Amino acid sequence: REVRTTQASRALRQRGAPLVSSRAVITSTCRFFATSTQKDDGGHSTTKGKEYAIVCPASRGIGLMFARHLLKNTQLQVVATYRSDKQKVRDDILQFVAEEAKEEDEKDGNGKQYNSSDLDGRLHLIDVDVTKEETISAAAQQVKSEFKDHTMRLMFCCPGILHPERSPAQIDQQHALDTFAVNTIGPMLMIKHFGELLPRASATLDASEPLPSGFGVWANMSARVGSITDNSLGGWYSYRSSKAALNQATKTFNVHLRNQKAFNAIAVALHPGTVKTDLSKEFWKSVPKGKLFEPDRAAAQLFDVICGLTKDKGGMCFDWKADRIEP
């Protein structure tokens, strides 16, 4: 969870600036990237300082922690979606960053209290309910307008609900429909309206970011139980089926990105493991020791998996260890 400052420090040294605390480095580097020349060595247009990531939803659990992790470990603009209580979501995302930064400064002997407003400018909140297409469409139009000169480097799409049927007799029609609406159709509608914002083939992406070099990533939150090959326990009919369908949608979208030569991006599905969120609360006691992850750890692990992707991994599903999960 250490703040990555290597590129930041190098950038400041090149400008002749004295090295300061890691938090000050990040703040100064934001300004540096915002004013850097937007040309690469060959004179081509680049997206340096003009890239963003979207986290949907980011109001709690893994999504909330992933938004925080992006603010701490990248220089991207971060678009976080919410359904209600916009100010609370903003406060939840920024408060933790500020508290951790204060602890880091105190360890350095600085002792200065960090002001979260330094990161507040990189955080943008947009209203999205993945079960209502009109909100997705409106959000996409808002992003297109506000970030028209920017490139979407990463989409982290993580909506999810669980109704754990243990036998066919427990299958409830409305619960099953709700599960597919959130877990499968929601991400598909996000693809419909936001997919075109992924990097174009002509864009030169910012190599100083820790994300995969040279291409964008669309990451859908899946689950190991979505694997048909891996299903030896049964149960969870609607959840398993919704995640299997999401894996197929992810694969299909990746084929689209590959065939449409205008894009330079891949789509993958990710399994976070069992995470200590409301979705899995009923099953915490049955999880082996060391395999129940706090949301912040899960977010960091998935970020590392994304950063380690190569372009030939598109369309696949990976777990939190970066091991491939067979369909």
Image (tube, rainbow, N blue to C red):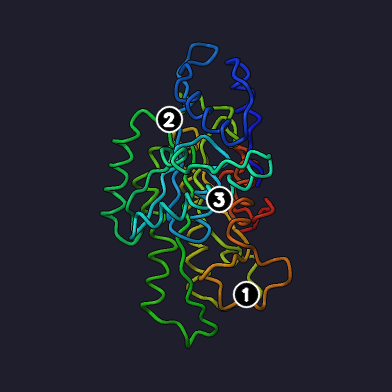
Q: Which is nearer the eye, 130 or 67?
A: 67
- Disc 2 target residue: 262
**Image height check: is 62 above or below 206?**
below
Residue under the image location 46 percent in, 41 percent down: 53
Counting from the top left corner in percent of width and height, residue 191 is at: 40, 48
Earlier-in-chain disc, 1 versus 2: 2
Mark 1 or mark 2, which is nearer to you?
Answer: 1
- Disc 3 target residue: 99
Which amino acid type corresponds to the residue marked 2 in the rendered image?
Answer: Ala
The image's mark for residue 284 is 1
Mark 3: few, some, or many residues within 10 Å (few <14, many ≥20)? some
Name the quadrant containing residue 22. top right
Residue under the image location 56 percent in, 74 percent down: 281
Which amino acid type corresponds to the residue marked 1 in the rendered image?
Answer: Trp
Which amino acid type corresponds to the residue marked 3 in the rendered image?
Answer: Glu
Residue 211 appears left or right of 248: right
Q: Give the distance between the C-alpha atoms of the residues marked 3 and 2, in whole angstroms.
A: 42 Å
Q: Which is nearer the eye, 214 or 113?
A: 113
Counting from the top left corner in percent of width and height, residue 136 is at: 31, 51
Name the quadrant containing residue 84. bottom left
**Image height check: is 305 above or below 246?**
above
Q: Give the distance between the C-alpha atoms of the residues marked 1 and 3, in whole angstroms.
A: 28 Å
